[in-house]
Image: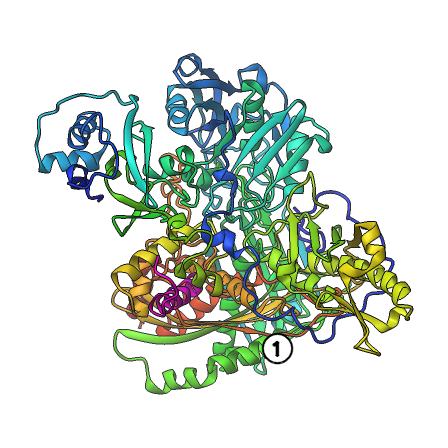
């Protein structure tokens, strides 16, 4: 993985392209449907229980698969005795590295190539064998009956110790993933010399696990040499590519369907080893196979946000001018080169005006599960460091932290080659409108005037952020069909991962075609029947699909109006679509229902095709955000109550006010978990195993951990230069500044700066006690 | 826990042939398959009448969404598993299968319970309501309606459980305070983080129910 954000992390290989659109496409002016709050077009399915997720599928003669995983963080499998398991009633097949089904070396991702059951287990949870049985209970009985011989090796489970001499080796060549990557602009030494205040601090973020509500899983079914997989995924075409490569099949014979899925957050952008295992077991038994991972497996084997160790040195003048940043970050993607330190430095490079910046990123191998992209890779970690540092700099020069940020707003993307201008930046407005709506200055003054006596202390905190992605881009194709009765079908390959993609696309088509969103029937997320779309991730689905859907709608509208112009004998330019009718704008009494167009009747249907146009050359498109929160800290117990939260966001045009707000609140909630409770705990000394692989010991934010008082302030300015829908992504930026905003509020309340996540009560109460001793 | 005493009550809704409820539980307990069942036996010590093999299928009758269903189960099968994989009632989801997330929440005799921590055999004789049971034909009920209006979901996988938890709360407390809602909904995780909208939806559902939005 490169740190260059211009090559999105979800795109492999050559930069993509799509054909040029024929029709000139102008930005929207005022919109009638887009931007309004709109309940989801699939709301009924989601609340009635009738939405079918991959885990819900039952096919005739279907069997259940389960996977045996290495209990050791580092071991070689020297033998697998499956005989007892195979003889159990209800067991239909057992496969392992020692059965003929798994002799080949296969690609499992861009970074991992091995046998499906790699005899060299470099992490706890590596797949060792798989079974197919009548039900999941029997399948797990069979796993327990498999006798595996392991040669156990020394392990290293702490990346902070993995580069020390004598540390156990994940690979013989060493535990350094690759040469550290460096970036430099200006002269940091000169920058620090010019500064009035120079601060330096170390920060750490713990490893976070995605844990979507629906565990990873699929149903695989063969029809002759064609394979159909119902997969819980963010991207059916990604999974198709992965499965076809792993099985050596043509893409056309691999059909992936992913209509509903229970959350991904980056962990479901690719096919899993379990997908390959399901396909192999289905082949061997000649029956469909369903594999749903156990919750414990999802903690070990299907990705994480790597831990981050960061050092940041910053210089600022008394007037608030930032003079230099020097950043060093290290992380671990576990046992494979999946990007342990990727993009850690991006917000340092790009968020604030700074002429002198130097960064260094180091990827380290340890014996732990491979990382996967997780909601804005690297950015929440970098923001944890940068935004706490900004707070400390502001305090050091006695400036309001919002003011300091406002003094350093860039109009160009300094971190990119050639420093291209942003198509739009709403960072100032996020800070200004956000602080006004939050009553930042008043609240802060009020708290400071009242003085923070007693053991319940109040504080407010702010943090900002940007997401290096969020522009979307090619390739993407969408088809819109208008039937002879005027009804409309929208065909796109994108998954709706819960972000409301289907609803927004129905709104886009409805806007352009003059109908209600409910009139648009959507087919999506099926490589067999729908058009190409990249995976839904990286806050790029809406800015990729919306302009493409609009282009398809414009294309079909052009054809419809041309037919109508012939029949009505008027100029095409005088016609428009409204309420299912073609209307003459110069003579509104002249109108005809679409279903009455004779040429449409004769053709039965008309098809419009939209392609995603390229992004503007030499420009950067990024969403921006500022988060504000108020906390109450109990200094006796270290407990933190988050009283209220506000997220101000520039994601270009607001597409659906209702789902936009939901994304913002969801990002804040996840960020609260990241800052306050979430942490993978590896037993680094004794066993190397994860000791909290469940939701009881690895705690997510619950209904009791988030404030009911949450506010979403959209900076609703269309980015018409970015794309013809004027939108940028929202999912990623919504979680980037959250955790440091909480940390800054806790600092405001207590005077204690906590540099490590998560700020749990035991850690905080200790930090408060230590600070008191120092008084 | 489920109201096991109902098995022998005077209004049997289905055929109660075969092993009696109490005798059956005793034999399950003897097989040391269920702590829950075993603890009931400790409370009411009875001599085991019959010992069943762990894999031996038993026919039980479940009352789900107002209908009785006879089903062959292994004593170790969870209610969530039987609902989803044996009866095709898949609105009830499984998130963790160990009582941590609440995605499998159903009402058992009106009270929200985790169906993954409940053995199917425990629920014989109890009234089970799943999210499908809140429907009136094809019409969604007031809690479901409120979740749509307030956009109280994203991926939707925890939603059935959230709806059942809200339904259970509102049956017990028709006009809950915000604090009461937060407390009562805290046994249901939502990784997408839609809690503020879930609070709003629960409040809205209370309104809809009070305003004659349809009793479910």
Magenta span has B214? yes
Which residues fall within the magenta stretch? B194-216
Q: Classify B31 as above or below A459.
A: above
Near mark 1 (Cα within 10 A), the count class, few <14, some 14-19 or many ≥20, is: many
Residue at image location 70% in from the left, 53% down from the top: A490
- Residue A294 visible in the picture: yes
* Viewer-closest of A242 and A372: A242
Chain name for mark 1: A
Residue at image location 48% in from the left, 39% down from the top: A56
- Residue A122 visible in the picture: no
Residue at image location 74% in from the left, 71% down from the top: A28
Q: Classify B3 as above or below A465.
A: above
* Viewer-closest of B60 and A636: B60
Location of residue A746 (image quadrant): bottom left
Magenta span has A34? no
Q: Which residue is mark 1?
A: A428
* Viewer-closest of A391 and A98: A98
């Amino acid at each position: 993985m490169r740190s260059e954000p211009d090559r999105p992390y979800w795109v492999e290989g050559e930069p993509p392209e799509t054909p040029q659109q024929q029709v000139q496409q102008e930005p929207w002016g005022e919109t009638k449907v887009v931007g309004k709050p709109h309940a989801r077009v699939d709301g009924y399915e989601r609340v009635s229980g009738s939405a079918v997720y991959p885990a819900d599928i039952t096919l005739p003669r279907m069997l259940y698969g389960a996977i045996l995983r290495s209990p050791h963080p580092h071991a070689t499998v020297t033998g697998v005795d499956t005989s007892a398991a195979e003889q159990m009633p209800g067991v239909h097949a057992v496969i392992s590295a020692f059965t003929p089904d798994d002799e080949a070396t296969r690609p499992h991702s861009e970074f991992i190539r091995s046998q499906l059951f790699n005899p060299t287990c470099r992490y706890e949870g590596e797949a060792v064998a798989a079974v197919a049985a009548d039900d999941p209970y029997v399948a797990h009985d069979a796993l327990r009956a498999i006798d595996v011989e392991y040669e156990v090796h020394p392990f290293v489970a702490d990346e902070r110790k993995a580069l020390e001499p004598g540390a156990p080796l994940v690979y013989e060549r060493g535990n350094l993933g690759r040469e550290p990557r460096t970036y430099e602009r200006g002269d940091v030494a000169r920058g620090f010399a010019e500064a009035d205040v120079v601060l330096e601090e170390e920060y750490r973020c713990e490893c976070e696990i995605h844990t979507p509500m629906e565990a990873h899983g699929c149903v695989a079914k063969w029809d002759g040499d064609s394979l159909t997989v119902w997969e819980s995924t963010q991207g059916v075409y990604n999974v198709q590519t992965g499965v076809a490569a792993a099985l050596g099949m043509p893409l056309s014979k691999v059909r992936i369907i992913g209509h509903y899925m229970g959350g991904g957050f980056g962990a479901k952008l690719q096919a899993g080893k379990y997908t390959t295992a399901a396909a192999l077991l289905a082949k061997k038994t000649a029956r469909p196979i369903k594999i749903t991972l156990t919750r414990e497996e999802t903690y070990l084997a299907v990705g994480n946000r790597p831990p981050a160790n960061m050092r940041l040195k910053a210089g600022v003048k008394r007037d608030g001018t930032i003079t230099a940043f020097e950043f060093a970050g290290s992380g671990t993607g576990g046992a494979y080169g999946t990007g342990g330190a990727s993009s850690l430095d991006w917000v340092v490079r790009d968020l604030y005006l700074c002429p002198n910046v130097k960064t260094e990123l180091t990827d380290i191998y340890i014996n732990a599960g491979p990382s996967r992209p997780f909601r804005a890779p690297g950015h929440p970690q970098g923001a944890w460091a940068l935004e706490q540092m900004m707070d400390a700099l502001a305090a050091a020069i006695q400036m309001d932290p919002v003011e300091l940020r406002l003094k350093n707003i860039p109009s160009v993307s300094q971190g990119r080659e050639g420093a291209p201008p942003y198509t739009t930046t709403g960072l100032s407005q996020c800070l200004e409108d956000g602080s006004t709506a939050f009553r930042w200055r008043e609240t802060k003054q009020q708290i400071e005037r009242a003085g923070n006596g007693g053991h319940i202390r109040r504080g407010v905190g702010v943090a900002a952020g940007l997401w290096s992605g969020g522009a979307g881009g090619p390739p993407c194709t969408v088809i819109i069909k208008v039937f002879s009765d005027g009804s409309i079908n929208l065909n796109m390959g994108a998954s709706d991962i819960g972000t409301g993609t289907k609803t927004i696309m129905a709104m886009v088509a409805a806007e352009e075609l003059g109908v209600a969103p409910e009139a648009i029937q959507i087919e999506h997320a099926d490589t067999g029947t729908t058009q190409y779309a990249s995976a839904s991730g990286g806050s790029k689905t809406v800015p990729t699909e919306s302009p493409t859907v609009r282009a398809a709608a414009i294309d079909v509208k052009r054809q419809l109006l041309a037919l109508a112009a012939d029949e009505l004998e008027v100029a095409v330019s005088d016609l428009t679509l409204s309420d299912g009718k073609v209307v003459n704008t110069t003579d509104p009494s002249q109108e005809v229902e679409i279903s009455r167009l004779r040429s449409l009747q004769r053709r039965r249907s008309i098809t419009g095709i939209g392609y995603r146009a390229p992004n503007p050359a030499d420009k950067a498109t990024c969403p921006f955000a500022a988060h504000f929160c108020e906390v109450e800290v109990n200094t006796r117990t270290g407990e933190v109550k988050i009283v209220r939260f506000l997220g101000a966001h520039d994601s270009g045009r607001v597409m659906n006010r209702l789902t936009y707000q939901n994304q913002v609140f969801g990002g804040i909630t996840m960020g609260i978990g990241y800052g306050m409770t979430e942490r993978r705990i590896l037993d680094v000394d004794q066993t190397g195993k994860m000791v909290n692989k469940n939701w009881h010991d690895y705690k997510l934010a619950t209904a009791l951990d988030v404030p009911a008082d949450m506010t979403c302030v959209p900076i609703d300015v269309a980015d018409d230069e970015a794309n013809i829908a004027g939108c940028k992504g929202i999912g990623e930026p919504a979680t980037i500044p959250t955790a440091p905003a909480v940390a800054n509020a806790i600092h405001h309340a207590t005077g204690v700066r906590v540099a490590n996540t998560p700020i749990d009560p035991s850690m905080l109460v200790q930090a408060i006690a230590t600070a008191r001793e120092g008084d | 826990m489920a109201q096991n005493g109902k098995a022998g009550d005077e209004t049997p809704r289905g055929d109660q042939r075969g092993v009696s409820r109490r005798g059956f539980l005793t034999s399950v307990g003897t097989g040391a398959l269920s702590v829950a069942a075993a603890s009931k036996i400790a409370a009411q010590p009875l001599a085991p009448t019959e010992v069943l093999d762990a894999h031996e299928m038993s026919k039980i009758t479940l009352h789900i969404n107002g209908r009785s269903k006879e089903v062959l189960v292994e004593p170790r099968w969870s209610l969530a598993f039987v609902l989803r994989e044996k009866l095709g009632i898949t609105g009830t989801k499984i998130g963790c299968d160990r009582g941590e997330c609440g995605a499998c929440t159903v009402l058992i005799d009106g009270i929200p319970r985790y169906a993954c921590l409940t053995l199917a055999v425990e629920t014989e004789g109890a009234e089970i309501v799943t999210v499908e049971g809140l429907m009136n034909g094809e019409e969604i009920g007031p809690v479901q309606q409120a979740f749509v209006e307030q956009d109280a979901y994203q991926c939707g996988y925890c939603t059935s459980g959230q709806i059942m938890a809200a339904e259970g709360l509102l049956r017990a407390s028709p006009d809950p305070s915000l604090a009461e809602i937060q407390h009562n909904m805290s046994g249901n995780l939502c990784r997408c983080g839609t809690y503020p909208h879930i609070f709003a939806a629960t409040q809205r559902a209370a309104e809809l129910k009070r305003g004659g939005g349809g009793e479910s």
